[in-house]
Each structure stands twice: as C-alpha cells, then as structure tokens.
C-alpha cells in the first residue's frame, strides 16, 4: 500500500503527474466534483492546524467525498494512552484514507506500519511535511514556470521548520537549484539535511545569518515562523523570534520577479503591508494547497476523472 510519509516517497515523475492534475483541477473543477463519491477521508490531528487540515477537508469535499476526524489530541483516545498504531487500525474501519499530523517525529510512519488504509503525513514534529512541499512546488511552478534553474532563499527557523526540510529534499532533485540558507547560528538546518541531502548530492548552498546581502540574488524567498512550540525554553524563543522581518524596504532590494512564499501561519516575520506587493504569494500558496491535495487524494485512492 502506498503511504506518503516523506516527499521522497514520490518520484520526480509522480510529482509532475500530481502538479499536472492539480492544474487540470484548477482549469476544470467540474470534471472532478464527484470522483470521490462515497469515499471518506479521516483527518487525525494531534497538533494544531488551520490550513493543512481544512485544505485536506475542502479537497475531499470538492471531490465529492466526505470527511471525519478530530483536530486535537485531547479529544481523541490518545489521552487514554492509545497508540497511533491502534488508532489507525480503528479509523481504517471507518475511512478510506487518513491524513495525520503529530508532534512526534516518525508517528505517521509508525501508524503506516499498522494501517489498513493509506496514510498521509500532514506534518510530524520538526521533521517533515510532504504535502506542504507539494503545495510549494505547485506554487513555484505556476509562478516561475519551472522547478529548475532557481536560487531559493530559505529564511528563519531552518532547524525546527519541517516545511523547509521537505522542500530542500524535493528541490534537490531538480537541475541547477541553489539554496541560500538564512538563519541565526542556533536555527541552522539539521545535519541530516546538510550532509545527507545537500552535500551528498553536490548541491550548491550557502549559509548566512543576514538577509540584506543576498536579497537581490533570489528567485524565491521562503520565509518561516520561528517554531515556538519546539523550543526548550521561552527565553531562547524570545531572543530569536524577531531576527528576520521582511519589511517593504527589505523587499525593495529583491528582483521584480522574486516571489515571496510562507507556509503560514506568520507571526512578525512578514508585516501585513507587504501583502499588497505583487511578489507576495503566500495566500495563493495556501489556495494551491487545496488543489494539490485533491490530486494527491485521487492518486492515493486510485480514482480518475
Ligand atoms: C506549517 C507547519 O505546520 O509546519 N504550517 C502549515 O502546515 N502550513 C508551518 C508552521 O507551522 O510554521
């Protein structure tokens, strides 16, 4: 059975197929309105979410299917000590596919070992977030017209930011992609990404702690929130939370065709007056998330338009 735990579970060709389907859904939504009739998606969210859970649910509803689930661990049997393996064996009796978010790294993988239905990792701790990456790839391809020959700046919490880890893994498979990794010393990318993905594949990258010097080099600027919930102490969070703020003045240093992305939620890292800049694409990105999740659900359920 195919589970999506890590973005590498999908080949480059499969990703292209999903993005092509998402584009077709955008162009011809009526064609897809009933393809998942009588199918059910369960969203098991042991950690807070707005976009990911609601875009999964909207995706299934727009495919003609139904949704069930829970949006906080406290309302599930996890509070009674149930394991994720047991939870999915039960939910698999009621639903055809499961999207799971969990604060523990590896929980969706553990669930997949026991699940009778396909599992989608909707974010596991500070580890991975493959469906956000599909959202990001669709956004980059639609806005820039390509996924190769790009200089991508990733800025903020590169240590705990799971969307960053999955995006680097995915983008490393395209030709001539260069990364500029902007973070304070304490929030640099983990070694398994630096060594295991970038160095191993001979990908060009630089690590820097300031935005100004690199702003004019970027095709994509991917801002992230400092992940408060993954910090060990509040003092460190307070010290690091506002290190990077993309003001209008800062954005003026960027090229006219640079796109600004953010998985959202944002805190202070992008002031709201940047939203009107035509280069700001984070709300478009959130919309794209629904279409690409529609394509993914169809693929994983084996349904066609
Ligand atoms: C991200 C996440 O949950 O990792 N949000 C999302 O899914 N769009 C980013 C974040 O929480 O900062």
Image (tube, rainbow, N blue to C red):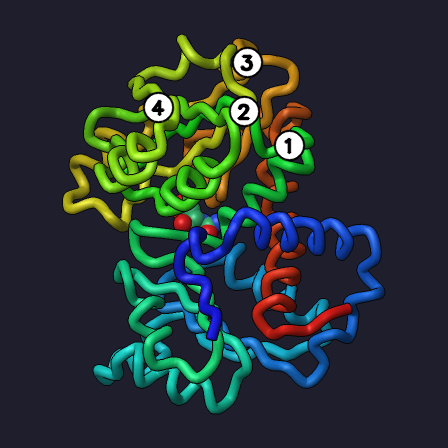
For label 4, the SS is: strand
Cα distance between the residues tagged 3 and 1: 19 Å
Q: Report the side of 171 relative to 302 (left or right).
A: left
Q: Which residue is mark 4?
A: 182
Who's the residue at 48% across and 31% down the image?
222
Q: Which residue is mark 1?
A: 146
For label 1, the crowd category at 10 Å Cα-Cα, with few meaning under 14, some 14 to 19 and many 20 or more, is: few
Q: Are marks 3 and 2 in contact (CB under 8 Å)?
A: no
Where is residue 4, by image quadrant? bottom left
Res 220 visible = yes
Cα distance between the residues tagged 4 and 3: 15 Å
Q: Report the side of 186 relative to 98 (left or right).
A: left
Cα distance between the residues tagged 4 and 1: 23 Å
Cα distance between the residues tagged 4 and 2: 16 Å
The quarter of the image holding the C terminus is bottom right
For label 2, the SS is: strand
For label 2, the crowd category at 10 Å Cα-Cα, with few meaning under 14, some 14 to 19 and many 20 or more, is: many
Residue 23 location, x and y as percent? 73, 49
Numbered mark located on residue 150 in the image: 2
Numbered mark located on residue 219 in the image: none
N-terminal of the pair, mark 3 or mark 1, is 1
Cα distance between the residues tagged 3 and 2: 14 Å
Q: Which residue is mark 3?
A: 254
Who's the residue at 15% across and 46% down the image?
232
Is residue 70 shown above or below 167?
Answer: below
* Residue mark closest to the camera, 4 vs 2: 2
């Amino acid at each position: 059975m195919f589970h999506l735990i890590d973005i590498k579970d999908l080949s480059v060709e499969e990703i292209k197929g999903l993005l092509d389907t998402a584009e077709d859904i955008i162009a011809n939504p009526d064609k897809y309105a009933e393809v998942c009739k009588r199918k059910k998606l369960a969203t098991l969210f042991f950690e807070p979410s707005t976009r990911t859970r609601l875009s999964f649910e909207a995706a299934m509803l727009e495919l003609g299917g139904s949704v069930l689930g829970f949006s906080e661990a406290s309302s599930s049997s996890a509070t009674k000590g149930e394991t994720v393996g047991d939870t999915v064996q039960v939910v698999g009796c009621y639903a055809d596919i499961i999207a799971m978010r969990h604060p523990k790294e590896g929980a969706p993988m553990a669930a997949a070992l026991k699940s009778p239905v396909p599992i989608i990792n909707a974010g596991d701790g500070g580890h991975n977030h493959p469906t956000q990456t599909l959202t990001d790839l669709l956004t980059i391809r639609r806005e820039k017209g390509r996924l190769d020959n790009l200089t991508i700046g990733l800025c903020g919490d590169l240590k705990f930011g799971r969307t960053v880890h999955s995006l680097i893994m995915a983008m490393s498979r395209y030709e001539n992609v260069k990364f500029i990794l902007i973070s304070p010393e304490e929030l640099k990318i983990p070694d398994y990404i630096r060594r295991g993905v970038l160095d191993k594949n001979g990908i060009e990258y630089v690590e820097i702690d300031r935005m100004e010097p690199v702003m004019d080099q970027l095709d994509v600027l991917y801002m992230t929130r400092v992940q408060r919930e993954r910090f060990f102490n509040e003092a460190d969070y307070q010290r690091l939370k506002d290190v990077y703020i993309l003001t209008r003045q800062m954005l003026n240093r960027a090229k006219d065709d640079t796109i600004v992305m953010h998985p959202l939620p944002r805190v202070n890292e992008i002031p709201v007056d940047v939203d009107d800049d035509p280069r700001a694409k984070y709300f478009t990105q959130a919309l794209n998330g629904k279409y690409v999740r529609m394509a993914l659900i169809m693929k994983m359920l084996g349904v066609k338009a």
